[in-house]
C-alpha cells in the first residue's frame, strides 16, 4: 500500500512554455503532499506543501507564481512550472503520507529539461 | 542552518563488509528519524526509522542506532552488497512524521559498495 504515482517521468520543453507534473496517491487519500526539487549531486529541497482544498505553503525563496500548485482532490496534486527557463531544469519529486501512517512515500520523480 | 547533517558526502566499502553512515542533528525537538535510499533518477525509498524513545532499531541487514545525548544517529548495513550502492538520506521530524509534518533532510551520503 501507500503508492504515489508521478507523471511524466521525463519531459523536455522549450524555454517560455509551461509544464505540468502530476502526483497521485493511488491507494490512499492525502490531504497533504510535498513537492521537492533535487539538483545534481545535491540534497532534496522542499519547495512547497500542497494542501487539499486550500493554498499551498511555499518554502522561503520559492516563487509561487512560477511554481503553481493545485491540490484539487484528495488523491491528486499538480505542480506547474510556468514560463520555464533552462535554470528550472531539475529533478522534481512529490511525496505523501496516508493519514495515520508514519513516514512518507515518494513518487518516482520527473526529470525536467528546459531547452 | 543545516539542522540535519551528513558530514560524509561519500563512502566506499568492500562487498561483505559493514557500511556505517552517520547523521548528526541540532534540533533537540526532533523525535523521529528516518533513513531513505535513493537511486539516480528515482524517488527516495524508505529504509528504516527510529523513534527517540529507542536507541536501536533493526530490520534485516539494516540497523539504526540513536544516541540522543550526542544528537547522533547511524545506519549500519551488514553485510554490504553492491546493490546497496545509492545515496542515503537521513531525515528527521518533530513528532511522528505523517500527514502534514515536514521532514528535515540531510544532504545525503553516496555509498559505493565494491565487488
Image: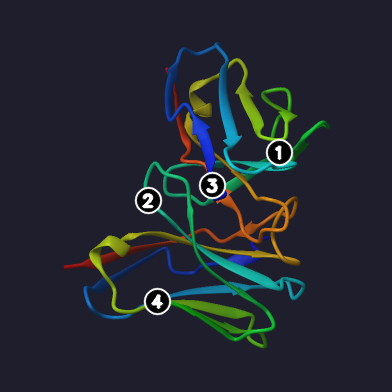
Where residue A61 is drawn, which disc sits there?
1
Instruction: Check if mark 4's residue and mark 1's residue have beta carbons within 8 Å.
Output: no
Q: Quadrant of residue A76?
A: top right
- Residues at marks 1 and 2, CA–CA distance in whole angstroms: 27 Å
Query: In the image, which is nearer the foreground, mark 3 or mark 1?
Result: 3
Label 4 close to label 3 by CB (< 8 Å) = no
Q: Please tell me whether mark 3 or mark 2 is closer to you in this view.
A: 3
Q: Position of residue B12 (x, y in %)?
A: 28, 69
Cα–Cα span, label 4 and label 1: 41 Å
Q: Position of residue B97 (x, y in %)?
A: 69, 61
Quick one: label 3 or label 1, which is nearer the N terminus? 1
Whichever of labels 2 and 4 marks the residue nearer the N terminus, that label is 2
Q: Name the residue under label 4.
A: B60
What's the distance in space between the residues labelled 4 and 3, CA to CA? Answer: 22 Å
Q: Which chain carries label 3?
A: A
Which residue is disc 2 drawn over?
Answer: B39
**In the image, residue A88 lies at what x, y percent?**
53, 28
Q: Quick check: do tags 4 and 3 share a chain?
A: no
- Disc 2 is placed on an element classified as loop
Q: Is residue A4 shown above or below A71?
A: below
**Residue picked out by circle 3:** A106
Q: For the point 67% across and 23% down, which residue is it?
A: A66
Answer with left or right where residue B103 lies relative to residue B100: left
Amino acid at each position: 500500500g501507500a503508492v504515489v504515482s508521478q507523471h511524466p517521468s521525463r519531459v523536455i520543453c522549450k524555454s517560455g512554455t509551461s509544464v505540468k507534473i502530476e502526483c497521485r496517491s493511488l491507494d490512499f487519500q492525502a490531504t497533504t503532499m510535498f513537492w521537492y526539487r533535487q539538483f545534481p549531486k545535491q540534497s532534496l529541497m522542499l519547495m512547497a506543501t500542497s494542501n487539499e482544498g486550500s493554498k499551498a505553503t511555499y518554502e522561503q525563496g520559492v516563487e509561487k507564481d512560477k511554481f503553481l500548485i493545485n491540490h484539487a482532490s484528495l488523491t491528486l496534486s499538480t505542480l506547474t512550472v510556468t514560463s520555464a527557463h533552462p535554470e528550472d531544469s531539475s529533478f522534481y519529486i512529490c511525496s505523501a503520507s496516508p493519514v495515520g501512517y508514519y513516514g512518507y512515500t515518494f513518487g518516482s520523480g520527473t526529470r525536467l529539461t528546459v531547452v | 542552518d543545516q539542522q540535519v547533517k551528513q558530514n560524509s558526502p561519500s563512502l566506499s566499502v568492500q562487498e561483505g563488509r559493514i557500511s556505517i553512515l552517520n547523521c548528526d542533528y541540532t534540533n533537540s525537538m526532533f523525535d523521529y528519524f528516518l533513513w531513505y535510499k535513493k537511486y539516480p533518477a528515482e524517488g527516495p525509498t524508505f529504509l528504516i526509522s527510529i523513534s527517540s524513545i529507542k536507541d536501536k532499531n533493526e530490520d534485516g541487514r539494516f540497523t539504526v542506532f540513536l544516541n540522543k545525548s550526542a544528537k547522533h544517529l547511524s545506519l549500519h548495513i551488514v553485510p554490504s552488497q553492491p546493490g546497496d550502492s545509492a545515496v542515503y538520506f537521513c531525515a528527521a521530524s518533530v513528532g511522528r512524521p505523517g500527514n502534514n509534518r515536514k521532514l528535515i533532510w540531510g544532504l545525503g551520503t553516496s555509498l559505493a559498495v565494491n565487488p
